[in-house]
Image: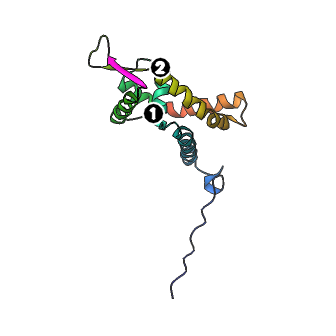
Amino acid sequence: MGKTINAPIIPAVGQGKRGVDGHLGYLLRQAHAAHRIRMEKALGELDVTLPQFSVLTMLAAYPGASGADLARLSLLTPQTMSVIVHNLERAGAVSRHPHPIHGRIQVIELTEAGRQLLDACRARVQPVEAAMDSGLDEAGQQLVRAWLVRLAEGDGVL
């Protein structure tokens, strides 16, 4: 007869090491994964990926950024950024033109269609963002934001 193997019981999110007793790094990764899934679901109906949304958002905040700038801002590799910009350009959401001084650098800008797409994306992700803020007053939100920035600044990698 076969031996019975007792599989470990995997706790639900919020329980055991997946809850307040978990390691901070794991909890950040778990929260990131949950957030990514929610954002992808919200953006999916617009046929926009989360990295594309990030690029559109950063272009709106920093107009005229180069591909290298966008890669750093969006936490993506230059190769990935090249594909994303190409796809956004093909969709009419961005345009590229040579930098006025450094001709080898391509300046990337949102088109009117890109601004409209970004507005539609923002409307879709607003409930996801609001859910993250729920339960926190303004001071609590600022504390979390400051903590996350401090974590990112901590080792100078980014």
Give amino acid for label 2: Glu
Nearest to the observer: residue 150 or residue 140: 140
Of the residues shown, which amino acid type is indicated by label 1? Answer: Gln
**Which secondary structure class fits the magenta region best?**
strand
Between disc 2 and disc 1, the foreground one is 2
Residue drawn at 48 percent across, 31 percent down: 54
Q: Earlier in the sequence, mark 2 or mark 1?
A: 1
Q: In this figure, which residue is indicated by the disc labeled 2?
A: 112
Disc 2/disc 1 C-alpha distance (Å): 16 Å
**Mark 1 surroundings within 10 Å by alpha-carbon count, few (fewer than 14), some (14 through 19), many (20 or more):** some
Residue toward you, 60 or 18: 60
Q: Position of residue 147 (x, y in %)?
A: 60, 33
Question: What is the magenta range?
Answer: 92-99
Q: Is residue 87 magenta?
A: no
* Residue 57: percent from left, percent from top: 50, 26
- Quadrant of residue 121 within the rendered picture: top right
In the rendered image, the vertical position of residue 17 relative to residue 64, given as above or below: below
- Which residue in the structure is indicated by mark 1? 52
Q: Secondary structure at mark 2?
A: helix
- Residue under the point 59% across and 34% down: 124
